[in-house]
Image (cartoon, rainbow, N blue to C red):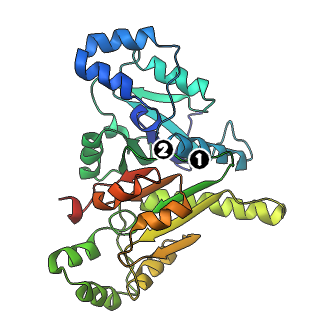
Amino acid sequence: MSYELGNRLVIGVASSAMFDLSESDRVFRTKGEEAYRKYQAKNVDVPLKKGVSFSFVKRLLSLNDLSDNPIADPLVEVMLLSRNDPDTGLRVMKSIEYHNLPISRAIFMQGKSPYDYIPALNISLFLSGNSTDVKEAISLGFPAGHVMKSAIIDEEDKDLRIAFDFDGVLADDESETVMHTTNDLNKFHEHESKKVTQPHNPGPLKEFLVKISAIQKIEEQKKQKHPDYENRLRVSIVTARNAPSHERALNTLKEWGVMTNDAFFLGGIDKQLVLGVLKPHIFFDDQSKHLTSTSSVVPSVHIPFGVKNN
């Protein structure tokens, strides 16, 4: 029987998102592909250092212990999607093994981005350090994020904290378009108040949130059976919205059947101030101006979607 992906949370990661490839990239840029191939062959048994999204991936995979059969029926599947060919990608696979990550499935496409395979593999999130690949994936309607150079958070605990901006990430850019075209906060609030009971259309990461929420519900079921169990997965919304526009956002989440643990409606306050305390293992935002600030304190991912990125 074939291995089914439909009922799992599937994440696609490029090696550039998960590992520090700065030295490898320098060789490729300055000396060309042949020198790069020789460099990777020479260093094939030298493990790559952890990159920005490493902790997020590791902690996400650890949630598979919530499954009754973590090996045959995991809740989370992470696949490597690489521009390397199989030979030069061997170092990445060996690094995955060295770091004890249960990742066994990979796609290698020499010099080409593998994002076309996102729908076929039921991927809810594709992470890459290549901004061009991510922009092209988003333009095709695929859920993708550019992992920026940013702080790495990786403590000894087992928690996984995920933070999202709302507009242009979980929801589409309808409301951001109102703000962008009018440049009038009162018009924005008026628009949101008028449509308070109308859920937003989905943004790029809506399905990712829904599947994360499903794992949270499994955690709650476990806690009911084992009261001493401590929930590990925590989801937060960190948005520039404030009252009265907060209500439509909350109504939308309720309509989608999801609940977040925290919601920060900051009304223009620098998100870095909150995220520096919250310390998520990954934060998604559609506006690079916000991420320039947040990347100094938390792993930050740009979702190049919507009117703010046109």
The residue at the point 71 percent across, 45 percent down is 65
Q: Is residue 281 left or right of residue 226?
A: left
The total number of labels drawn is 2
Is residue 84 shown above or below 182?
Answer: above
Q: How far apart are marks 1 and 2 (CA)?
A: 10 Å
Residue 13 can be seen, yes or no: yes
Question: Of 298 and 44, which appears nearest the observer?
Answer: 298
Question: Of 204 and 16, which appears nearest the observer?
Answer: 16
Is residue 291 shown above or below 68?
Answer: below
Considering the numbered disc 1 on the image, is that residue within a helix, a strand or a loop? helix
Label 1, on which residue?
60
Quadrant of the image occupied by residue 58: top right
Is residue 48 shown above or below 45?
Answer: below
Is residue 165 shown above or below 33?
Answer: below
Give the mark nearest the N terminus, 1 or 2.
Answer: 2
Whole-percent x, y for residue 256 in the image? 48, 71
Label 2, on which residue?
11
Whole-percent x, y for residue 259 in the image? 56, 71
Q: Is residue 293 left or right of residue 43?
A: left
The residue at the point 33 percent across, 27 percent down is 83
Q: What residue type is labelled 1?
A: Leu
Considering the numbered disc 2 on the image, is that residue within a helix, a strand or a loop? strand
The residue at the point 28 percent across, 76 percent down is 175
Quadrant of the image occupied by residue 126: top left
Estimate how packed mark 1 is, as few (under 14), some (14 to 19) or many (20 or more) residues with alpha carbons within 10 Å.
Answer: many
Residue 165 can be seen, yes or no: no
Quadrant of the image occupied by residue 59: top right
Estimate how packed mark 2 is, as few (under 14), some (14 to 19) or many (20 or more) residues with alpha carbons within 10 Å.
Answer: many
